Image (cartoon, rainbow, N blue to C red):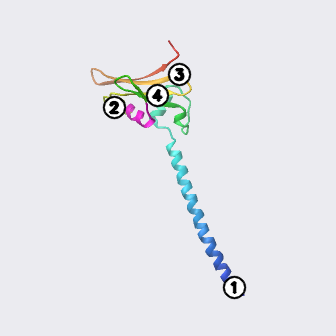
Amino acid sequence: MNTILKDARIKLALILIPTLIWNCREKHELEQSVKAVYVSEQISPVVKELLVFANVTFTDTTNISSLLAFKFIDENGKVTNSDSEKNTKIYKNILKGKATSILPIFEIIGSDKEIFVVQNRGNIGGVWAKILVDKKSD
């Protein structure tokens, strides 16, 4: 009787141990993917600065694509759709005084406002400005 009971316990252990290991592995992978999604949705400091400048309400986990549309204007005046990463890079280069032939446009979704960033050369160095434009105003 004892050997039958021991055999049953061993078989039960052989079934339960792989199941427990498998369940632990799945939870670990799920936790990593949830953390990755949270990190990728955080708003960059540059975009935060622009949202504050435009007086737009947001939180650190607000989906940026629901707040801003990203575009740029080239040296020929052609406006092209862009993305957050490209516009942020152009904006940072302008702040550093680097000359660029394209200028970023940050369109505030759900309003008639856009933020233009312009640059030029001054007597001492580069000059830049952020301009908030309301398309409805004259």
Q: Residues within 10 Å of mark 3 (few under 14, many from 20)?
A: few
Identify the image quadrant of residue 82: top left
Give the residue pinned by disc 2: 96
| CA separation in Å, label 1 and label 4 | 74 Å
Say whether residue 94 is magenta: no
Q: Position of residue 25 (x, y in %)?
A: 55, 62
Which three-letter amino acid code belongs to the residue tagged 1?
A: Ile
Earlier sequence position, callout 2 versus callout 4: 2
Residue 88 sits inside the magenta stretch: yes
**Is 12 on the left-hand or right-hand side of 45?**
right
Give the Cα distance between marks 1 and 3. Answer: 79 Å
Query: Could you tell me which quadrant the N terminus lies in?
Result: bottom right
Q: Amino acid at mark 4?
A: Phe
The circle drawn on residue 102 is none
Determine whether 29 is above or below 133 in the image: below
Residue type at mark 3: give it. Asp
Residue at figure coordinates x 27%, y 23% from the top left: 124
Which residue is at a point 63% across and 71% down the rendered structure image?
16
Q: SS at mark 2? A: loop
- Of circles 1 and 2, the one toward us is 1
Q: Amino acid at mark 2?
A: Lys
Q: Which residue is under mark 4?
A: 106
Q: Which residue is mark 3?
A: 112
Residue located beneath label 1 in the image: 4
Q: Are marks 1 and 2 in contact (CB under 8 Å)?
A: no
- First in sequence: mark 1 vs mark 2: 1
The range drawn in magenta is 81-91
